[in-house]
Amino acid sequence: MSDSVFDDVDVDTMIPVRLLINGRDHELDVEPRDLLVLTLRDRLGLTGTHIGCETTSCGACTVLFDGRSVKSCTVLAVQADGHAITTIEGLAGDDGLHPVQDAFRRCHGLQCGFCTPGMVMAAVSLIDEGRATDEKSVRLALKGNLCRCTGYHNIVRAVLTAADPSLVDDA
Ligand code: FES
Ligand code: FES
């Protein structure tokens, strides 16, 4: 009798997956243990998604999974089979920056930029879900995204500005 549900999994077996990333279909073979973040970066060259902790703590790897933010160091590539993934590279359109990217730029919501792709993706999801309603809700919702530089104040201003400029006194 098996001791673990993983006993029957051959980690060396390549599994075909189909990922819809930034609106483009990608068919590739992955190992069962491959993390989504490494697949994005190493297999597809989408290095805008950063790796910080690899333990679900920092949020640097945040992407949208069917429109909801997830930490891609905590998602296996096989779990993303058949799903739509949006990375920071997929946000800007033909007419320029996404409104959240533009708000980060205008509000000085970044310094070194390491946390920024994850912050922006988390903010996009937060705003789309209608949860960026005031400073407290934004700070609470972004508590899983760490920034070593900014002190968070301008990040919060940027998210509120993108959600509704009237939420920010000096937006
Ligand atoms: S690298 Fe994924 S949460 Fe830190
Ligand atoms: S801008 Fe440097 S870690 Fe956030």
Image: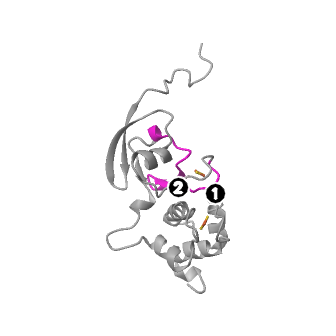
Q: Is residue 80 above or below residue 149?
A: above
Quadrant showing the C terminus: bottom right
Q: Mark 2 near ligand 1 (CB under 8 Å)? A: yes
Disc marking residue 144: 1
Disc marking residue 50: 2
Give coordinates of residue 121: x percent, y percent.
50, 61
Give coordinates of residue 57: x percent, y percent.
65, 52
Residue contact at pointers 1 and 2, CB within 8 angstroms: no
The residue at 33%/74% (across/down) is: 95
> Is residue 76 magenta-colored?
yes
Disc marking residue 114: none
Q: Amino acid at mark 1?
A: Gly
Q: Mark 1 or 2, which is nearer the eye?
A: 2
Q: Mark 1 near ligand 1 (CB under 8 Å)? A: yes
Quadrant showing the N terminus: top right
Q: In whole angstroms, how far apart are the C-alphas of marks 1 and 2?
A: 15 Å
The residue at 60%/47% (across/down) is: 54
The residue at 42%/70% (across/down) is: 98
Give coordinates of residue 38: x percent, y percent.
49, 45
Q: Residues within 10 Å of mark 1 (few under 14, many from 20)?
A: some
Quarter of the image where one finds residue 116 = bottom right
Mark found first going from the N terminus, 1 or 2: 2
Stretch in magenta: 56-79
Q: Which coloring applies here?
A: one colour
> Is residue 117 magenta-colored?
no
Q: Which element is circle 1 on?
A: loop
Outermost residue on the top side: it is 1
Q: Nearer the viewer, residue 51 or 152?
A: 51
The residue at 61%/72% (across/down) is: 156
Q: Nearer the viewer, residue 102 or 136?
A: 102
Q: Residues within 10 Å of mark 2 (few under 14, many from 20)?
A: many
